[in-house]
Image (spheres, grey):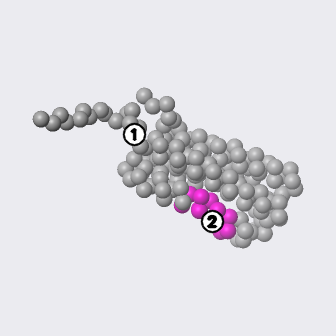
């Protein structure tokens, strides 16, 4: 039996870690004076803790679940996820955070929330990759053919 966590556990721990870390970052941003208010197409809006938790967990859980399901079928999935996951986390700063009219503290805090996902993604994808590959100890032993 392997002492490695299951792929499901890695996905769950990744999601919980992202939520906890980003709620701490968000709380720090609030304490630093961030209002997290912005103007949306429907009028004034505000990013609250529930939104931070959801935007931290949902995309991450979807991505990690896809990696966990596909990694045993194709080894290249891990390499793609190690590039695409962090790129999406950073790219969404440019697409979602920078174009808004947040105050500086709110914008910096939310950008940092995106950046905290990068090491979480990398650690989870590496762990999923290790779990998806059988170790030598778990491979069935095949005796060497005896020559005559």
Of residues 140 and 89, which is closer to you in this image?
140
Provide the residue designation for mark 1: 134
Residue shown at the point (55%, 49%) measured from the top left: 61
The answer, for residue 51, to whether it is visible in the render is: no
Instruction: Identify the residue under disc 2.
Output: 91
Question: Is residue 63 positioned above or below 96 on the image?
Answer: above
Q: Quadrant of residue 100?
A: bottom right
**Quarter occupied by the N terminus:** top left
Image position, residue 90 (x, y; %): 64, 62
Provide the residue span drawn in magenta.
Answer: 84-96
Residue drawn at point x = 50 percent, y = 35 percent: 4
Magenta-colored stretch includes residue 94: yes
The C terminus: image quadrant: top left
- Tell me what residue is drawn at x 71 percent, y 65 percent: 97
Say whether disc 1 or disc 2 marks the residue closer to the N-terminus.
2
Viewer-nearest of labels 1 and 2? 1
Q: Is residue 135 left or right of residue 48?
A: left
């Amino acid at each position: 039996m392997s002492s490695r966590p299951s792929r499901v556990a890695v996905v769950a721990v990744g999601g919980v870690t992202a939520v906890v870390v980003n709620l701490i970052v968000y709380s720090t941003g609030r304490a630093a004076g961030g209002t997290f208010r912005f103007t949306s197409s429907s009028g004034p809006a505000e990013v609250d803790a529930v939104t931070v938790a959801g935007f931290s967990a949902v995309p991450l859980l979807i991505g990690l679940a896809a990696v966990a399901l596909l990694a045993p079928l194709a080894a290249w999935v891990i390499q793609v996820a190690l590039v695409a996951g962090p790129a999406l986390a950073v790219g969404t700063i440019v697409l979602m955070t920078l174009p808004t009219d947040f105050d500086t503290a709110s914008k910096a805090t939310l950008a940092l929330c995106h950046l905290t996902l990068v090491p979480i993604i990398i650690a989870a994808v590496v762990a999923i990759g290790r779990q998806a590959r059988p170790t030598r100890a778990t491979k069935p032993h095949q005796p060497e053919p005896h020559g005559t």
